[in-house]
Structures are given as C-alpha cells and as structure tokens.
Amino acid sequence: MELSLDMYQTVALAVIFYFLGCYIRKNVSFFSKFCIPAPVIGGLIFALINLGLRTSTPLVLNLTDTLQSVFMTVFFCSIGFTASFRLLKKGGVQVFIFLAVAIVLVVLQNVLAVLLAGVFNLDPLLGLCTGSIPMVGGHGTAGSFGPLFENDLGVLGANTVAIASATFGLIGGSLIGGPIANRLIVKRGLKPVCNQYSEQEETVLEEVLPEVHEVDTDRFMNAIAILFIAMGIGSIVYNFFKSINLTFPTYIGAMLIGALIRNVCDLKKMSLPEREIEVCGSVGLSVFLAMALMSLRLWELAALALPLVVMLLAQTLLMAVYATFVTFNVMGRDYEAAVLAAANCGFGMGATPNAMANMQSVSSKFGPAPKAFFIVPLVGSLFIDFFNSGILTIFINVLH
C-alpha cells in the first residue's frame, strides 16, 4: 500500500519534523554540543520511521520533492550574495592564506575519496559522496549533490551516503579539533599574544556581520525579489551549461548570479538587504535539509557499510594530519595557528558553527585568539562553499 504526499503536504511534514528537531536539540545536550542542525535531527527521525514502516508494514510513504529544489536554490543563491571579493581583499593576507589551505583540503578530500572508491570497486562519483561534498560542504552541499548523482547520473545510494557522511563529519570534526589544538599548544608551549581585534579587523567584521534593525516589509520584499531574479537568470545560465554537456548542480547558476550582483553592488557602492537575504537563505536551508533528510533511503546503507566506514575513517585521518602538519605550519606555527587547526577540523568535516565551537573550546582554556575568530567566519561563511562547488563541478565532469 502506497501513500503519496503532494508538495504542500510534504513541506508541512518537513516543517513539523523541523520543529521536533528543534525541541530535541534544545533538550538533549549531545546535539547542541556537536552543532547538529535541527532539520537534520528531525529529518533523520522521519527517515528512521520510514525505514521501520518499510521493513515491518506494507505501507510505503512517497514524498514529493518539487519544492525541495526551490528551497535549496534559495539557500545557495543567498550564499552567492555573501561572496564579496572586496571583503576578502580587506581581510588581509592571512585570510587569503587560510582560504588557500581550505581549497587544497577540498581537493585532497576528493582525491582520497575517488582513490578509495577504486579500492572497493565503487563508482568514483559515489566515492565523492564521502569527499568534500559532505566534509567541507556539510549537509547543505550533500543534500544538493546527492540527488544530482542519484537522479541525473544514476549513482545508486549517492544521496543516502552523502547525508550519512555529512552527519558523521559534524561529530568527527568536533571530536578531533580540540584535542589536536590542545596537543600542539601544550607540546610547543604556545601562548596567546593578542587579546583584541585590530581596527581594520573590527571594520571588516562590522561589514561581515549583518546589520540589526526592525523587521521591514519593503526590505524583505526587495530581498525576495533580488533572490528570485538571480534564480531566474541563474536558471538560464544552468541551462546553457547543460546544453554544452557540462554537469552542474541546479543551483550553480543562481549562486554565480548572486555573487555577480553582490560584487557589482560593492563596486558601485550600492547597498543590498543583506540581513533579509541571509534570513531567506536560512529558512530555505532549514526546510530543504528537513526534506532532504526525510527522503533518505536508509536501507541502501547496508551493502555499503564496510566501505563507508573505512572511507569516513580515512577522511578523519586526513583531516587530523592536514590540520596538524599543514594548517598549523602554514598559518604561522603559533598559538593562533593552533586554534585555526582546530577550526579547520570543524568546518573541514562539518560546518562553520562547528569550527567556531572548536575555537571557543580551545580559547576558553588557553586564552583569546582574535585573529582566528576573525579569519574563520570570513573563509567558512563567505567563500569556501563557493569554491567547493566549483571544484566539485570539475571533478564531476572529469569523472563522469
């Protein structure tokens, strides 16, 4: 017996499980400690319920993913609007260096994933679902590339593997970041040397942090209008790429147009409703993630259990080695570099909130690290998703 939900019923169910995830996250410290998003918690609960129904009853639930793509594109389009190269330039040399460190990590994660897929005789695209898609990209990128691989490229189980890997990454990155920094600091006797932001850093942070003001209908309308205009033009860009046989996620055009609009506005000194665009993107991400997690077919993981465990442990080892010997050394071999190594583990396997949590844990024990707290939000929030999507697109078109 099949029960099919239309797009309105599917979104309503996603919202219900999102709020269930919010309640659980608030009341169970494990989830808040490891910065696991509420839609991930709620969506996984539904996926487990669906698994139970499938294995023990004749009832099969079918969800409609029509609006999932819309919410996904809203989120990634809003990411495009954060890619201000003027802010990157103003951030200074250290921001560029840390961004380069993060970009190299993205490439290494994907190379390792493809090599291990070959060892287990798996599709290399399935291997990518344990690389930078879920690691640096987190659940947002996993939820967008997984369906692309599975539905458009025929890679069975890609969506489930990508989401499962992203969940593992959130926990793994949070577990190894603090101990790595602690070992570096204690072994080398490192001490904090600065306890405040420079004047230039304060200026850049003021621009990065969205302005706070009362809710304004006109500003929200402008934000929604700009987002949908970028999404509309972006769909033309995506269709062009598709017409010349290049494989891209559907949101890539919208994200590129969003970045173009942002940087033109920066050049012309025109203001954008940045706070409202961010709120729209956050709402889009929450609903999109809930729907993506709800659609997981967990029964597909059984055949991939051993390869998946080995590949994820290998990614964890890569992250630990990279943070210890590359991030720490390249960023200056000092106290701030050790804190940045912890942060790199956080968003290198999870998301920027995990990076911030890792840094907070280290700095609360050893002392302030203002440069690290300045660099990480710029790279983790503004640019790494942008570059990760581009690098993944190159890998996909080479491997496919």
Image (spheres, rainbow, N blue to C red):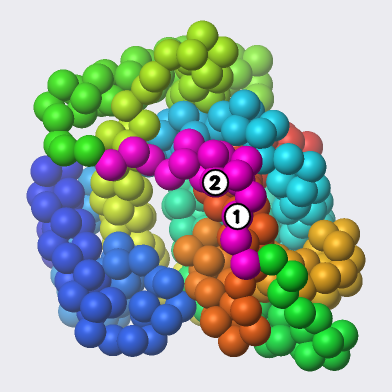
Q: Which residue is mark 1?
A: 197
Contact flag, marks 2 and 1 (Cβ < 8 Å): yes
Residue name at image x 53 percent, y 66 percent: 356
The reply to whether residue 290 is in sight is yes
Q: Is residue 329 above or below residue 366?
A: above
Magenta run includes residue 201: yes
The x, y position of residue 383, in whole percent, is 61, 41
Picture quadrant where residue 318 is located: bottom right
Q: How many marks do you count on the picture?
A: 2
Left or right position of 330 against 170:
right
The x, y position of residue 366, in whole percent, is 65, 84
Q: Is residue 288 above or below residue 213?
A: below
Q: Is residue 40 above or below residue 227?
A: below
Q: Secondary structure at mark 1?
A: loop
The foreground one among 319 and 183 is: 183
Q: Quadrant of the C terminus?
A: top right
**Mark 2 and mark 1: span between their CA atoms?**
6 Å
Q: Which residue is mark 2?
A: 202
The amino acid type of the residue labelled 1 equals: Tyr
The reply to whether residue 253 is in sight is no
The foreground one among 127 and 41 is: 41
Q: Quadrant of the N terminus?
A: bottom left
Left or right position of 139 against 59:
right
Q: Secondary structure at mark 2?
A: helix
Which of the marked residues, 2 or 1, is nearer the chain's N terminus? Answer: 1
The foreground one among 14 and 296 is: 14
Residue name at image x 34 percent, y 15 percent: 229
Task: State which region is magenta.
Answer: 195-212
Q: Residues within 10 Å of mark 1 (few under 14, many from 20)?
A: some
Magenta run includes residue 21: no
